[in-house]
Every structure is written in structure tokens, then in C-alpha cells.
Image (tube, rainbow, N blue to C red):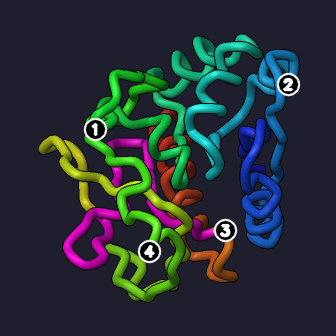
Amino acid sequence: MTKIGILALQGAFTEHEQVLKKLGVETVQIRNRQDWEAHTDLDGLILPGGESTVMGKLLHDLDLFEPIKTKINAGLPVFGTCAGLILLAKTIVGDQTKHLASMDINVARNAYGRQLGSFVTDADFKGIGEIPMVFIRGPIIEAVRPEVEILAKVNGAIVAAREKQILVTSFHPELTGDERVHAYFLEMVTQVKQDKL
């Protein structure tokens, strides 16, 4: 059975857990180093929305930063939403901070500004079709390197992308009631498992 870890330091981790349970997947909340070391058999990891600065600091404070970064760089499938996307980006526009820096993208935080801080729209997601997207002070991917596949755009701005086994969205698929983005991630996880056989 597929087993997915969910970083549960803050943010919308419970909602991700509920979606994965509906899809019949075992989940584990990762709150500290002990949780991480107790579940060395994870098939994938979700980095939820929240406050990227706080989450980045907690990863260091809880001694989770290095083991998670090492595992992602070694090929662990990971799905970052909103703040999770920022944690995974190699470059944060206008900010020298580097978090996990595993994905070759430039990201702008809170890119929609206050007026459009939160909104809902429908847009096409490559390989899935049109899906609902909930944005809550979401970041925008401003630039991608050639190896990064753009999966969705809203008003010309990149809001979903994939690089190898890393998937990111600016929006919150866990808040829409539509399970297809999580199912897409689980297909990525399955592919990585098959490639290892």
C-alpha cells in the first residue's frame, strides 16, 4: 500500500490527509525528527500551504531540514502546495532565503497582492483537464528552467509545474473537493516505485 508523509508543522495538512484517505492511501503526519525516522518507508511527501518562513524555520529547529532535503534530492516524490511550493523553489524573487531549494524555478511570494489575495477560478491542468483552483495569497512561478514542465497557467501566470518527481501548485487542491491533482501525484509516486523495481 502506498504511504505518504504529510509535513504537519502548520497550515492545511489535515485537508491533504482527508483527500488521500478518500483515495485509499495511508498517511503519516510528520511533526518532528522522530516521526521522520520512524517512517523510513514513505513513498512520497506533501508540503502543505501555510507560512513558508515559519515552516522553513521549523524544519531547521526540529532537525528535519537536512534529512528531508537529502531524501528529496535522492528521488523521493514530493508535492508542495502554496507555501510548500516556496519551500521547494531554488529562487525566491527579492529574497535571499533558500529553503529546500530542490526545484529549478523562480517564485514570487504573495504575487497576487491584497485585492486578489484569495480567489477561486477554473483552469486547465495538463493531463487532467479543467479543475477548480483555490488561491489564498498564492505565489506565482515567474520562471522555470528547461527541465521543468509547466502544468497550469491562470491569466498567463504559471500556477502548477513538475520537475522529475517534484510537483508544485500555487493553489490549494485540498480545499476544492476535487481529488484529481492528488491522484496525479499518486500516479507519479507509483511510477517512481515501478522505476525502482
How far apart in space, not on screen, are marks 4 and 1 (Cα)?
20 Å
In the image, the segment drawn in magenta is 151-173
Q: Earlier in the sequence, mark 4 or mark 1?
A: 1
Task: Determine the secondary structure under disc 4.
Answer: loop
* Element carrying mark 3: helix
> Closer to the observer: label 1 or label 2?
1
| Helix, strand or loop for the magenta stretch, by majority | strand
Query: Residue 35 has which mark?
Result: 2
Q: Residues within 10 Å of mark 1 (few under 14, many from 20)?
A: some
Q: Is residue 40 above or below residue 179?
A: above
The amino acid type, in three-letter code, at marker 4 is Gln
Residue at 64% across, 76% down: 179
Q: Quadrant of residue 165?
A: top left
Residues at marks 4 and 2, CA–CA distance in whole angstroms = 39 Å
- Return the residue at label 1: 93
| Residue at (34% x, 29% y) in the render | 95
Mark 3 = which residue? 174
- Residue 40, given in percent of the width and then of the height, sits at 75, 23
